[in-house]
Image (cartoon, rainbow, N blue to C red):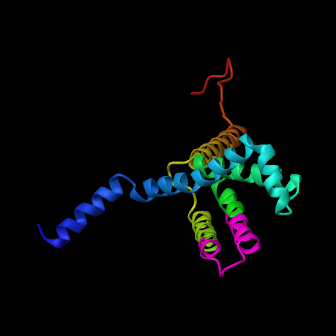
Amino acid sequence: MTLTDQAAKLHTLAAKYHLKDITLLAARLLLSVLFLHEGLTLATHFDAAAKAMATQGISLPLLIATLALQLGAGLSIASGLLTRLGAIGLGLFCLATATLFHTNLASQNELLHFEKDLAISGGMFVLAISGAGAFSLDRLVTCYLQKRQRDKEMVAALLAAENNMTVRVTLPVCGSARP
């Protein structure tokens, strides 16, 4: 088997199994796990989290907003519903976290967290641009809305045709015979 044959076979397999869409699904799940886990941890240990955040100068409303963002956008990305919006929200969140909380770059640990937040942010922005892929609720909703639009257009066309349709029927008049 030549290299060209092998490449063609790989291309056929990739097309058959929608490799791009499978990869997007895996990436979405991997990215969302981090935020869902953190959000659930904050929610289940809310009092301790509130005390710890207060020492960092984070108010209770901001903690609640962070919790809602992590859980809401995490579920959005995992399910593929409003994926682009969730990815942009978490991408901006990671940028803010990196620049506001991991500022002591002389510390190897802080530098690692800074770089990790930047990398996650970059992944979120790539996801925002690429979208959720075929294996997502976004795709199902889009297909449903497109079908509804086609149905509306079909009904409008049928009604228009019905309104413009006239039938001319000429009936013979009784008693008048034509030669």
Quick one: quadrant of the C terminus?
top right
Viewer-proximal residue, 80 or 61? 61
Looking at the picture, how far across and down is residue 111, in whole percent? 62, 76
Looking at the picture, how far across and down is residue 137, in whole percent? 59, 45
Say whether residue 106 is magenta. Answer: yes
Q: Residue at 47% of width from left, 53% of height from top?
A: 26
Q: Which residues are magenta?
A: 91-112
Asked where in the image residue 125 lies, by quadrant, the reply is bottom right
Looking at the picture, how far across and down is residue 27, in whole percent? 50, 57
Q: Residue at 56% of width from left, 57% of height from top?
A: 31
Name, please, the residue furthest toward the bottom: 106
Quick one: quadrant of the N terminus?
bottom left
Asked where in the image residue 86 lies, by quadrant, the reply is bottom right
Magenta residues: mostly which secondary structure?
A: helix
Viewer-proximal residue, 72 or 158? 72
Q: Is residue 101 above or below residue 90?
A: below
Q: Residue at 79% of width from left, 55% of height from top?
A: 52
Residue 65 visible: no
Residue 71 visible: yes
Viewer-proximal residue, 166 or 24? 24
Say whether residue 3 is magenta. Answer: no
Viewer-proximal residue, 165 or 63? 63
Residue 39 as seen in the image, left or right of residue 56: left
Looking at the picture, how far across and down is residue 133, in whole percent? 52, 55
